[in-house]
Image: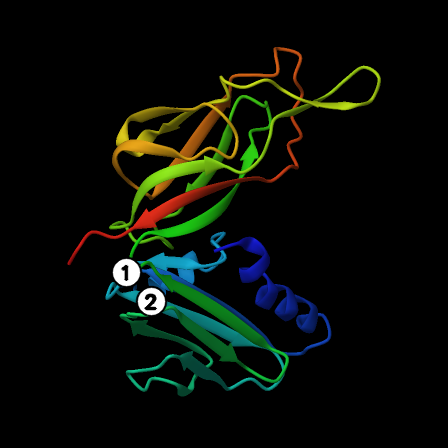
Amino acid sequence: MTRSLVLAPAALALFAGACCKESVTARAFFGHKSLDECLKLMDKPELPVSLVCPGSEVTVCWKASGGKTTDAQVTISPDPGGQSGSKPATGVLYLKPSDNTSVKIAASDCGVAIKQVQVIDGPTPATFDAHWAPTCSQITYSLDPNFVDDRLRAVDVTALWEPNVQQSDGSVATCPTPPFLAGSHPIEVFDFELDKPNLTRPFSRVLKAIGDWNYKLQTCGSSFKCNTFASLPFDMTLTCPAP
């Protein structure tokens, strides 16, 4: 899973909405949530793709408005339960997908939201963008349990970026490694080290995937200044326990 693949539908919907009277806001939450619970969480920032184990329940909810909106056309692919069809403008449905699933909610040709649910069946690489804290004290990405199955496990991690520093002459140099990053996963009270970029670090035990993943830079020196706008990709291998 990469951002370049999963963000494309959202970007298209955003630009279409600029000249469209109708709009649709939708979310795909892990677990069972009532419509009221869904609507209260609707403004919460989301991952581009919801991640679940096979057979786990997913709640898809939406709110369509604008123009003459009275209903929404929902298209689920694949749809073994036959739930696709015309639905209320504000609604909720429940899925237990065994395969990757796409849910399209349309109020019109231009007022559309598409939610993607990825089912983790076997070891699966997933890429997450981390960001610097405003103080440059640490790098963090988070797997929100509203969108990520709490049964998902992480078995390893790879930093897909290199620590660079700008020299006094304007040139850019790569900081020496090891050491590279000191990592922590607070929900599991687990600490680990990444010695080098692009080198996979297996964990000494299988870890819950949900929660914050924090890293502190161990190289580049005290004069290093981070770019708080930078996206720093990490790859993790995710898996689900056997049924």
Front in this rendered view, residue 107 or 78: 78
Please, what secondary structure does the residue beneath circle 2 have? strand
Residue 70, percent across and down? 51, 86
CA distance for labels 1 and 2: 6 Å
Q: Which residue is mark 1?
A: 31
Three-letter amino acid code at the position of disc 1 = Gly
At 52% from the left and 54% from the top, the residue drawn is: 2
Residue at the front extreme? Answer: 199
Please name the amino acid that badge 2 sits on. Answer: Thr
Q: Nearer the viewer, residue 39 or 165?
A: 165
Residue 154 at what x, y percent from top left?
A: 32, 42
Instruction: Look at the numbered disc 1 and give the secondary structure of its residue.
Output: loop
Farthest residue, direction top: 222
**In the rendered image, which quarter is residue 84 located in?**
bottom left
Q: Which mark is residue 75?
A: none
Percent position of residue 121, x then y: 29, 60
Q: Is residue 119 left or right of residue 234?
A: left
Asked if labels 2 and 1 touch by Cβ distance under 8 angstroms, the answer is yes
Where does the C terminus fall, quadrant-wise?
bottom left
Colour pattern: rainbow
Residue with the mark numbered 2: 59
Looking at the image, the residue that sits furthest to the right is 169
Between 180 and 141, the one lying in front of the other is 180
Residue 4 lies left or right of residue 242; in this view the side is: right
The residue shown at (67%, 30%) is 227
Who's the residue at 37% across and 46% down the image? 237
Q: Considering only order in the chain, which callout, 2 or 1, is on the residue closer to the N terminus?
A: 1
